[in-house]
Image: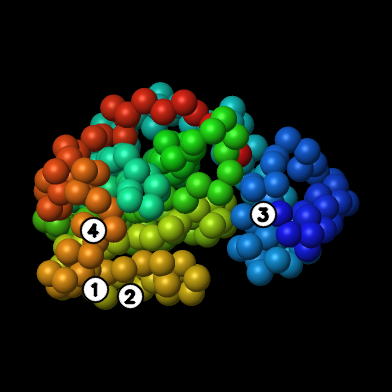
Amino acid sequence: MEKSHELKLTQMRKLVEKLGFSAERYGDPTLMRFLIARSMDTDKASKIFVQWLKWRSSLVPNGFIAESEVPDQLEARKIYLQGLSKAGYPVMIIQACKHYPPKDHVQFKKFVVYLLDKTIASGVKGREIGNEKLIGVLDFQNITYKNVDARSLITGFQFLQAYFPERLAKCYIVNMPRFFVSVWRMVSSFIEKATLQKIAILTNEDEKKTFIEEIGEEVMPVEYGGKANLRAIQDVEVPPLEG
């Protein structure tokens, strides 16, 4: 690790302590994600890290979300975990046609944590969680007005930005219908520029071909031009990881 990075990490740990918290149980890779997300500004990084600690202890007091906490969301079987892309990132697919605006928003927030935690954990190669990123595929095939839920989409992206910094490698949006374009325009106004740059909306065959090549045929489901079967996230066994 570069000397300048080591210095920044030391400064950040001290600043976190000054704010009345401890970063002792978190490794350098975790802290580095917050630093990168705030352009290596130790003051800003330590503040968002403390916000993350508070948020995590409030929404995820046990360190992970159990499936028993999100039964309504799991029942829809709308999230799939496909294995690792060619670049080594876990691939998560969301089929929006199986989603309906939730009645219980707290459960939905917990569900977002469950799916992001589990997807990230599935990409961890050693025991310690580090800088693992994920690829998201947002599929709008066959959606109707009943599936439109701007609030939940915004929640998902805001959680990624605020509480899972530097976790998104790429997000592909496929099969977006014309009627949804105005909804997406509104949703994207809540998404930071750095995140928007990682989102690719596929509109033609060449883009779809590149999409399949980047994911890899062995991981990409048959429904999207690959050779794999869809695997619902609750059917994939992944040891839970904190941090």
Residue of label 4: 213
Q: Are marks 3 and 4 in contact (CB under 8 Å)?
A: no
At x 49%, y 28%, the residue is 240
The mark nearer the N terminus, 2 or 4, is 2
Q: Relative to 198, is 207 on the left or the right?
A: left
Q: Are marks 2 and 1 in contact (CB under 8 Å)?
A: yes
Residue of label 3: 32
Task: Identify which amino acid the numbered label 4 is placed on.
Answer: Glu
Residue of label 1: 181
At x 17%, y 40%, the residue is 228
User: In the rendered image, is residue 8 in sight?
Assistant: no
Q: Is label 3 or label 4 in front?
A: 4
Q: Is label 2 or label 3 in front?
A: 3
> Residue 227: x percent and y percent?
14, 43
> Residue 34: x percent and y percent?
65, 56
At x 12%, y 48%, the residue is 223
Neighbour class for label 3 at 10 Å: few (<14), some, many (≥20)? Answer: many
Task: Identify which amino acid the numbered label 1 is placed on.
Answer: Val
What sort of colour scheme is used for the picture? rainbow
Q: Is residue 128 above or below residue 156?
A: above
